[in-house]
Amino acid sequence: MAIAERGYTHWPGSLEGGRRPWRVLEDFQEMLKGADKFLHINPAYFQAYYGSSFLIFMMLMIMVGSGSGLIADDLRHNSLPLYFSRPLRKRDYVGGKFGALAFFLLLLTLVPGILFILLKLLFAGSFAFLADYPWLPFSFIGWSVFISSFFSLYTLLLSSLGRNRRYAAILMVAAYFLSDVFFGIFYGIFHEPAFCLISVQMNLRQLSAAFLGAKPQFDVPWIYSFLVLSAVMVAAVLVLRRKIRVAEVIR
Amino acid sequence: MSMAPFLSVYRFSAKIVRRSKRTKVFIAVSVLPVILAVVLQINRLASPGRGLDGLAVFSNVVMGFCLQFLVLLLSLFFGTSITADEVDNKTLTYPATRPVSKTAFILGKYAASVSFLLVLVLTSTVVSFLILMADRLSYGAAWAFLGKSLAALGFGTICYTALFTLAGTFLKKSILFGLFFCFGWENVVQYFPGTTQKFTIMHYLKSLLPGMEAGVGGTEGTGLLKFLLFRQEPTPVVTAVITLVILTAVFAGLACWVFSRKEYLFDE
Amino acid sequence: MIPGGLAVRADKLGKWYGNVLGLSDVSIEIRPGITGLLGPNGAGKSTFMKLITGQLRPSIGTVTIDNQPVWNNPEIFRRVGFCPEQDAFYEDTTGREFLSGLLGLSGYSAAEVRDRSDRALAFVGLEDAADRLIRGYSRGMRQRLKISQAIAHEPDILILDEPLNGLDPLSKRKVIKLIKDYRTEGRTVLVSSHVLPEIEALTQSIVLVHQGKILAEGDIHYIRDLIDAHPHVVAVKTGDGRGLAAKFVGEADVLSVRFDETEGTVLFETRNRDRFFERLTRLAADEGLDVEEITSPDDNLQSVFDYLVGK
């Protein structure tokens, strides 16, 4: 019977002298081997960040925490007339709400992108990176603005559908995950890439890849994803125009 | 504790839950699996050569939609609503000034929400099953799978609603906590190897479902139940059930305890 | 049960919301009859109401009804009815469902719930609207529905928090009549308001609350006397201000006369408001005095409180 079968394994190395506390630093150095790939900032790096589920989930949490009550609370307290009794137009009201939420979302999108670039330039000590990818700053700025605008309008749309911020929060998350669940089920059964168009997350990933010059996950033209997301934004604007009434009936 | 106050709260709450406009939206969401089943079944019948197995599709719907989405979402909304709605709408004053103990109030409202959710989720699941298995209703293993699915969905509804009832009693932003828990913690940690996955409720719910090794009859070799391999180290069914029951009792008990000691101030 | 005889008693009652004082060192006994709880907004009336209905736990002191503590004592609510200040309802139910549901919580049988809800709805004049959704009710109907849920189980103690708030004069009269009708022998009714005439229309017995403390309690005439003893400013807008001033300046109770040129008014400071108004009315009638407007800038509760606390 081989020793390994009894639960033992042979170690082929040789014993060295006793460890000293500073050997921890050597272990740390060992751990960092290969970590230098994180310093290779390139378009794929940006795509990995901007297309990550984690980023989108955190944006969703910001939307739920800060955005769900933006319009729902005003509807609940009948405070729209207070806004419109000032020299404000509907577009000022919606624009203000939009701007407040977009600011927080840009903190998660635009700010990290700028930091990535700055750190890269700082550590590289040259502008070669910008010379190699001169379009990259414009790409991530454009994408940050697009995704933040999309989510801001998405939030305002769902926040305007009721007077309860908790209900709006649930709707926000439900609509997002529902589209993803349906994509998962249909794609799992039919293996048809075009089903990615029904998922908000997949559409965002497809489009972020197009913006950042990376290869999209599914072999579906990015323009379709752009059209789907744009349709949601247009629908949001139309619904907001209907829902935000200057005159409100107060009981 | 006398049952009369509990039953009166239950009846009153059930009526309010049924009447709420928001409930109608959630009814529409819970009908989605049925619509999905109809679409998929029509597709199967239209292209019989594609080899889609009705049971495999059903298990996909149960796992992908009902268990990991619908149950979480409904439990989160209705569970947190038990206290938060009363505080947000400033209606808590009415039940608080009746001869009903705070424990009876929480348990009555919890029972009303859970029974409503069970009707929604289980009905939708059974109807989806009947549609997808319309041509193989005599297949015994499929019924066994349905039974286990219903058990997992039922326990999921009961346990998650209890947890979110507790969250609603003491957290101001209980929805945010719930969303982090459902789509952050539960969605991720259940896939961790070793003991860590046992810190999720979903682990115990999935333990109630048949694993790949059990082989839901007729699906071996199709590979369509591969997703069940997600469940890496299942807990024995009896242990899972006991754990779920204990968790539910602890969450509901804590919710009653917190509610009977906390003062609720309305936003002025 | 024979109604009556129940007293609400607070002993050294205090309530803080964090660092904010809601109520401080309140010791009081509210006996059968109608008692008005009077105080400006933010005085602590609602805090007191919430403490005596067990919605808040006292930070210090005790509050009892019929010698039983109120906090976490649901049984006490078989004998207490409470009408909250906030305009809050289960909006998707009908008036009858709302009332029946709450009566159900009081433990009545189905038949008794039906009977009592019918009677309560009739009492507040909502029989015709009983099967409509509450979200479609007017403000007055909502207020009456709130009162009906407080009286439907015929409590010995009725506590009404600002029941006349936001009502038009007609609805106010209806609600005042309802409250007076409910007062049967021995029952305890506590009504809060920040408007003196509203309380005057209901009762003679009042408790004055200000900045979380009880300033005075007792007969309303006492408060009235304090008000009357306190110099009042009356502004009269007229075309002949100096002529009017000349007719009053010799009166003993007129302490001073000032002219507000920009507003075109004469400001009289008088020690006896009733006598001043009587004379002014007579002058207007007998001598055809052209009076456009009469206002009393300090004829409000706040000024009475300011006076009482010596500001």
Image (cartoon, helix red, strand yellow):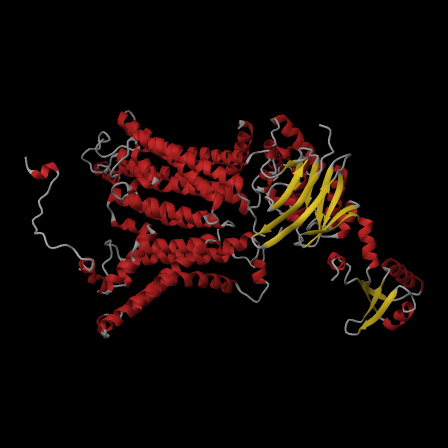
Where is residue B139 drawn, in percent x and y? Answer: 27, 26
Q: State the residue at coordinates (32%, 53%).
A: A201
Q: Residue at x 24, y 53 (%)?
A: A218
Q: Where on the picture, by quarter, is residue B159?
A: top left
Compared with C305, A141 (above or below) is: below
Q: How many marks?
A: 0
The answer to whether residue B124 shows anywhere in this view is: no
The quadrant the N terminus of chain C occupies is: top right
| Image location of residue B50, percent across then percent down | 22, 38
In the depicted view, which residue is nearer to us: B187 or C75?
A: C75
Residue B130 in percent (x, y) is at 34, 30
Asked whether residue A142 appears in the rendered view, the answer is yes
- In this rendered view, identify the residue nearer to me: A192 or B169: B169
**Image quarter of the C terminus of chain C:** bottom right
**What residue is shown at x 41% (from left), y 61% (from top)?**
A104
Left or right of B91? Residue A15 is: left
Above/below status of A89 relative to A251: below
